[in-house]
Each structure stands twice: as structure tokens, then as C-alpha cells.
Amino acid sequence: MASFIYDFSLLTKPIHEALYHWLPPVWALIAEMTLIGLIFLLFYAVVGLFLVYAERKVCAFMQNRVGPNRVGPYGIFQTIADFIKLLMKELIMIKNSDKLLFNIAPFIVIIASFMAIAAIPFAKGLHAIDFDIGILYVIAVSSLGVVGVLLAGWSSNNKYSLIGAMRSGAQIVSYELSVGLSLITIVILAGTMQFSAIVEGQANGWFIFKGHIPAFIAFVLFLISSTAETNRGPFDLAEAESELTAGYHTEYSGIKFAFFFLAEYMNMFIVASIAATVFLGGWMPFHVSSWTGFNNIMDYIPPFVWYFGKTAFVIFLMMWFKWTFPRLRIDQLLTLEWKYLLPINLVNILVMAFIVLMGWHF
Amino acid sequence: MDQDKLKERITALVPEAEFEENKQFLTAFIPAGKLHTAAQNLKEAEDTAFDYLFCQTGVDMTKYLMVVYHLNSTKHGHSVVLKVKADDRVNPAIDTVCDIWRTAEFLEREIYDLLGIHFNNHPDMRRIFLDENWKGHPLRKDYKDEVNIVEL
Amino acid sequence: MKEADFLDNATLETFKHTGGNVLLTTIDDVIDWGRSNSVWPLTFATSCCGIEMMAAGASRHDFARFGIEVYRASPRQSDLIVVAGTIVNKMAPVLKRLYDQMSEPKYVIAMGACAVSGGPFYYNCYHVVRGVDHVIPVDVYIPGCPPRPEALLYGVMQLQRKIKLATIADVKRIQK
Amino acid sequence: MKEVIHTPVKALEEEEYHINMGPQHPSTHGVLRLVVSLQGEIVKSLKPHCGYIHRGIEKMCEKDTYPQIIHLTDRMDYLSAHINNHGVCLLVEDALQIEVPERVKYIRTIIDELTRIQSHQLWWACFGMDLGGLTCFFYGLRDREKILDIFEESCGSRLLHSYYTPGGLMWDIHPNFQKSVKDFIKYFRKKIKDYDRLLSGNIIFMERTKNVGHLSKEDAISYGITGPSGRASGFSCDIRKHHPYGVYDKADFREILFTEGDTYHRYIARMDEMHESMKIIEQLIDNIPAGDFSAKMKAVIKLPAGEYYQRVETARGEMGIYCISDGNKTPYRIKFRSPNFSNLGVLDHLSRGFKIADLVAIGASLDFVIPDIDR
């Protein structure tokens, strides 16, 4: 077990208790929510900026380039410059567009990703809210983003945007299934939908190792379908730069475009952290049973390092996909889901259920 | 087929054809009225089989306008050049060959655009390069454009 | 190239307004720093110069080092239009429209002889616009037929210098 | 919303939906404009609109001398600049019946093949990018720089060289030429395997391109589709084989022919052509004879009155130059039969019934250079 030094509830609990001690319960709740909201906003900005920078450097590495290196040491301030620029850019209102929906769409996209982040445990005792149906909540919330994408495409009064939005709709509706089913495979193994319990369940081995081959298959399926759900990599049909110029956000400029841009990276982060939590043990260190010395050393690495390390690994995998594969066509995309991923997933669940029933897992 | 045989063949097909001597390819002037039937025959007949129109050029010869067809047979490997005159400089018109060789569709539009030769029965006789409301046809020798052309 | 040589060739900086209060000038500096280091070009090329523009973005020359990485295909999201190649009469209205679709602040680089002046198509040609500045305002001219990628990089660096001179007052003037 | 639900489905299907690709669009490789009628995502018909880069080169040529024309042909198909120049040079040399030195022929053939390789590299780069694999773009351009270095060394510029003159070359090749070409071949033989690994063998790529945009041999001939695109359909149209110029008759190479004629085979044809080009260069590079780099030419070149036709094989197909001379130092009429212009005509025929994404793939496999279409 992780040693108690790294239990963040030691830090969060006094704050919680102090707030309730000083303030009436309603105000304490509001204060708590504001605090968490602010922290997440900051976190959001930092992660977004870092991911954009990381993507640039990773893609530069894949493409034999050096990537940004003039703005600050190793170009680390590049994304900040981009952000300032986008913030100061003119916001163009499109004539004949649906003004309300046009303005609201980027916020829907970004709020959806914002909501999903609330359920994710970053370390022991370090999460905003610990639902007992955490996985269900994340699946439900993450599919809200598509509403924003659809609205953006529809309200822009641009044919490319509309095609992009329609593609995105079809894509997310189908891939949502695979994401859900591959997570359910692990839910069967873990016996709970609560994120904290899932992580605790991996104390003596990550589920990807514990669950034999079905868990590994579920991991691969989750990677594929979640990449599709975030509109990235070989599945970026909704943007499809060479076909639809910029897809659903063709008509957006300035900070509204930045919202879409940021939401893409945040979705990637969320998906990666779900993968890390459910399959790779979240903030749990890597343990090998009966190697006590090794396990103790692993315990000394703080849990958030484990967590971010695993997330970064999954993100790197997704970036690797993106910069290697050509894009799929829309019918191939749907064929892949309905004819391959979905049946494999269903069989996989059956196998997993059988394994759990027989008690063959570790 | 060598040049002499082709010559006989074309003479049999179009008795009015006039031949030019000392050219790279066998060159025949065909009257505008007979172009389409002659072209069709040259393509479809087994012994000529001119299935490949590799170049179609409009030329302004100042007295008349001319369209030059460079034909090749991918089967037999022989080539022939057909030339068709359009005497009327104001409303020149020649039958289209784009139903015989599909590549002519674009080439004829180009010739119409730059030389103003109208092709009868062409499915889409519009300007291809210049704007619809462009005045004149630039490749004609008497084309003058005070606004756009800076003479050296 | 030495820094001194780079600054020596023009007197752009002498046009910088002197004075102004500390707060505003600091904000100016921050905004200009952001803008000049994040110039996203539009994917737009008409002819040969476009190939050299692509080469400038590719591995050896690597535009991205200067933060000019993200080629946007949509004019709404781009800051810079590099007119790489000849602009003809039929294209000129389209180019104007593209320029209008871009959001402020926007910059134009005329790349290559054709975009600067019509280049080899200046004489005896009926369909070429002699210089893209007949259609849209140009910030930086890069001569050459086609200019080498290094020349484009140099031009972009000159543009960055120019962007750094802007103040909030200028922006307001433009919007009026 | 209610209205849409209650409208019969058939009425919805009958509505045509037009989208306008270009003149500024990432996948048209320049300023081509395609007006596409769609049904859902399926292309029903397509109308190309050209002329956004029509510069009137044919008209300009009527006022230019032959050496000046060479500089304009550079700017038509800028990726096959050397080969276009070669066409004009051959036209003038044949008309004046000048025998160019053997050395010039060798050098010209080698440089033509290098041009073909760099053009195909750029095509490969853009093909990958159009299909969504951005990394291809950087791989292709990285290797292309090596050829441009060789050009720069000998010809003095990267893209538009005008290195050939009627009668020979502008100046002799750089002493390093042979060594750097051999180095490049060695380097590229290794790197071309990366190309196959990255794109050719990729399952997504094969799914995207196989059985897409099928072109039969008859159609290829009728539409005048030449170059690798035509040869992928089985149309044997390699000018280098059928009407050899330079020293192609001394080199042993294969004309790449396929019968399938889909996007995938147009791709493979170009990839194989790069191998063949390397083979040609390897055969010739060691045998460049010593001698002059140019034949003796008069200061003013006047072609005898008459008609001339010269064909060369550019990277995209057959380039023909039809010249009518009236004995002056400028041609009376010169016509460039550009391969891209003919290839464009088939786009509508090929893309009907396929999706927008396929249209992009088909367009990329035909490899357009727009200034060559419009001239």
C-alpha cells in the first residue's frame, strides 16, 4: 500500500472541516465549490498549455524537426504566446448564422470536458467528487461535447462545417458504445463503478495485468475508440483538414476557436487519465507481488507522479497514432466500429464475465 | 501503316483532303464539314485505330483560324495530323470531336476561350480560363488590350 | 547572421512611438510579444513559390521554430497570408475575399517576384496582376523567383519586428 | 425540425447540395476550384473551374525568343522544370539540326531523372498529407532537399533552374556532381523503405485507395491520361520508351505498367518509377563522357519556317510542344500540351459515386500542378 505520507485527504480534510467550522454549511459548500472550480481552471489552463506544447514537440520529433525553440528556452513559452495572440484576435460574427447557438457552442464543448475532469482521482484523496457511479458519469458527460460540435457546425452556416458536424455526430454516437463496453469489461472485473474503489482494487496489480487477455483487449479497444471520440488522430474526420478545410470550426476565430482547440487537448487528457485510472492503476505504484523491497521503493514515488506518468504515456500513444496513420473514410470508420470493435467488445465482456465467475483472475 | 498508305486511306475517306509535304507527321487539311465523320471513321476503323488525340491546337493564321489535331494510334503506333480551317473570323464554328476523344472536351474549351472558335454540339461550351465577361480572345493576332498588356 | 546586421538593414524601430504610460506600454509589449511569436499562416499558395513555402515548413528549414507552425486552412483562424505566387485577374477578387475573411490583426507577405511586381509576367501578359499590393496591403516584400526558404524565414522575422512596433492606439485607429 | 421529419425521404434525396472546393483549399494543391454536387457525402458530379493562375504563357511566348521561352516553361510545371526545358531545347535543336555533344545528353538525362524523383517525392509527401498522414509530408520533403542540393551545386538554384540552353547547358556540371548523385542514390535507397513502411503497407492507406477511382485503359486513352496515372491503367505511353530522347535508348529500364488503374496502383506506379529512375541514373552516372558542355550556337536563334512537334516525358506525363515558326527569332504560335490539363478532364469521371474523402485521394493520385493546367 501507498504509505500514508501521500494520502492527500490529510491535506484536504482539514480544509474541509475548517470551512464547515467557520461558515454556515451552505456558504461552506459554495466556498468549497468556488475553490475547487478555481483550482481546476488553473489546472485546466496549465494542462492545456502543456499538452499543446508537448504535441508540438512530439510531432516535431516524429517528423525530424526541432519544433518551437525560439520563444523562451526550448520554446516552452510558445503556447503562451499563442494563447495571448488568440485572446487578442478579432471575433468575427458570421452574417446569417444562428447567433445564439454560434456563440454558445464553444462553451458547451469546453464545459463538457470540464465536467468530466471532476470525477477523476489524481491521487489518494485528491479528487473533486467521488461518485459511486463514477464511470457512468464520465461516459455520460464526455458525450455531451458532441452537442457543442453539432451546434457549431449547424449554426456556422457553412457547408464544410455542416458536413464536419454530421460526421462528428455519427462518429461519436457509434464510438460511445465501444468506450462504454470496454470500460464495463473492467467494471465486471473490479465489481464497482467508483473510481476510488477501482484504484484501490489495483493495489496488488493493475487491471491490465490482473484481467488476463480480455483486459488487454479492452485496453486496446478503449484506446482506439476513445481516440475516435476525441476527434483525434486517424479519426479526425470532423476536422479533416485536407477535405473540409477545418471542419466544424471553420468559421470560428480568436478565443472561440481556442476553446475548440483547448477542448480537444483536454478531452485527450481526460480520456488518457481514464485509461490510466481504469487499466493502469491510476495513482497506484507498480507492484510485483513478493518483491517487498522493490515495492517499497515504488511506494516512495509520489502517487501523482505515477498518475501523471501513466497519463502522459497514454497521451504519447495517442499522439503517436495521430502522427503515423492516415485518416479513415467515414464509411470505414463506421464499419470499423459496428463490424469489428462492437462484436469483439461483446465477446470480450462475455469472456471476462466467465473469467471472473470462475475466479481465474489474479 | 506507313505514311503513303495512310495518305491513300484518308484520300479514300475524304477526297477533298489536301496534304502538306515535308512534315514530321503526315498532315492533311480536312474541310470543316467532313471533320466529324472522318474523325469517327479514323478512330473506329480497325486498320487506322487513331484512339489517342494527344494534342489539339487552335492557331490564328491571320487570314483564317485553324484547328490542328494530332492523332496517334496506340495499337499501330502511327500518327497523323489533321487540320481544319475556319474561314469566318467573326463567328468561326467547327464540329466538336469530344464525343470521339473525351480529352477534346477541355481542349476545345481552351481553344474557344483563347481563340474564339465555337465548337458545335459541345456539351459545355464556356470559357475555361478567363472570366465569362472577358472581352476578346487573347491568342488572336489582332487582340489588343490597352489596359492589361504592358508592351515591351 | 549577426544580430547587429539583422537590425541594421532598416530603420523600422525609429518609427516606434516614444512616450506613453507605463501600464499601456507594458500591455503593448506583452500583446506584441504574443502576436509576433505566434503568426499562423494560411494554407495558400498559387504557384512555384508555394513549393518553397512548403520547403520552409519542412524538416530542414522548419518554420515551426519561430512559432509559425500551425498552418490553418481556414482564413478565420490565420494571422498571415503569404501570397506565394502569381495573382491573376481572375484570382484577385478571391484573394481580396480571403483577406477580408481573416480576422484582425492580419498581415500579408508578398513572396516572390510575381507577388511583388508581376515578375516575369510583367510584360506582354494579359491576365496577371502586377503586384499583389494592387489588391491587398502588403507588410513585407520578399523578392526572388522563387525566394529561397531562408529568404522567407528572414521575411517572417522582419514581419515579427514590424509586429513588435504596434501599439493599442494603432489598433484602435485601424478599427475606426 | 418538424417539417424535415414529415417531408418524404425521397424529396430529400433529390435535393442537390453543392460545395465549392477551392480556389483556396488545402487539397487542391494550388488554386483549382472544384464545384462538387453531393448527395450526402457522395459525389454526384464535379465541375472543375480553372484559370485562377492562367498567366497567358502561350501569348507571351509569341513575343519571346527561344532562349527566353525556356524560362517561361520552368514556371509551368515547376516540379518538372528541367524536363520542360529539355523539351524546348530538343525542339530547337531538332529544327536547326544541331548535334549536341554526347556529354550533354548524358547530363541532361541524369538531371531529368533526378527531377522526376524529386517531383515524385513531393507528390508522395502531399499524397500522404491529403490522406491525413502529416508525417509523410516531412519525410518526403526531407529527402527532396538532398536532390535540391545537387541541383543547387550544378545549376545554381533550387527550383527554377533554366539550366539547359538550346545546344547544351548553361555551364558545366560541378566537379562534385557524380559523387553527390551517387551518395544520394545510396541514401535514398535506404530511405525509400521508410516510405513503404509509413504509407504503402498501412492497412488504412490500402483501404482508402484500393478500388477507388477505377480508370479503364480505353478511358485512359480517350481522356489522354498519360504519365504514371495512365500507365497504372495499362496505357503504355512512356515517351522515354516510344520516342527516346537524350540517352534513354542506352539505359535499361522498365516501363511500369499495371492494369488495375485504381488510386492504389497510381500510387504504386509512381513509387516504382522512383526505383526505375534510380536505376537509370546508376547506369549513366559513371559513363558521362568528357567533352564540351555545349554545341556551337549562333547568337540569335531563328527556326526555319515550318511546324515542329516535340514530346518529352515529364513527371506527370506527356508534355508536347507544338511550334509553328515563320522564320523569325520568335515563334509564330507555340502550344504546350500539358499533361495536367488532360489529366484534369478525367476527375469528374473518376470521382462520381465516391465520397469526398475519395475525391481528395483521387485528386492527389492524379498529381496536379495547377500552373501547368492553366499555363
Image (cartoon, coloured by chain):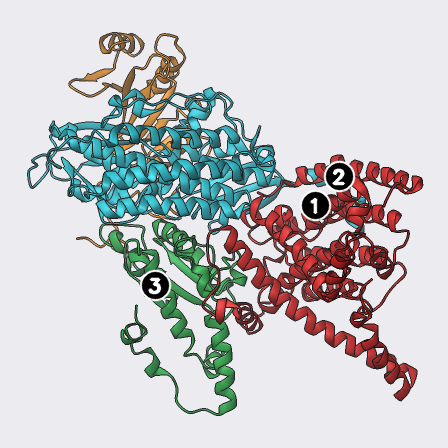
Chain colours: A red, B orange, C green, D cyan
User: Residue D352 appears in which quarter of the rendering?
Assistant: top right
Q: Residues within 10 Å of mark 1 (few under 14, many from 20)?
A: many
The image position of residue A38, as x and y in percent, is 73, 76
Q: What residue did someone put label 1 on?
A: A224
Q: In the rendered view, does D140 fall on the left or right side of D86?
A: right
Q: Does residue D375 appear in the picture of this structure?
A: no
Toward which corner of the image does residue D296 lie, by quadrant? top left
The percent position of residue B96, horizontal first and vertical second, equals: 39, 26
Kind of residue at disc 1: Ile
Decide: is A211 above or below C60. above
Determine which residue is flagged by label 3. Answer: C134
**SS class of the residue under badge 1?**
helix
Question: Of circles 1 and 3, which is in front?
Answer: 1
Q: Is tag 1's residue or tag 2's residue first in the polypeptide sequence? A: 1
Q: Are marks 1 and 3 on the same chain?
A: no
Q: In the picture provided, is D321 more to the left or to the right than A158?
A: left
Looking at the image, residue A138 lies above or below residue A30: above
Q: Is residue D210 above or below residue D356?
A: above
- The kind of residue on which mark 3 rests is His
Residue A341 is labelled as: 2
Q: Real-space Cα distance between discs 1 and 3?
A: 51 Å
Kindly report the distance in space between the C-alpha atoms of the residues bearing marks 3 and 2.
56 Å
Looking at the rendered structure, the secondary structure element under dot 2 is helix
* Residue D232 image offset from top left, x and y in percent: 46, 25
Q: What chain is tagged by disc 1?
A: A
Q: Nearer the viewer, residue A248 or A131?
A: A131
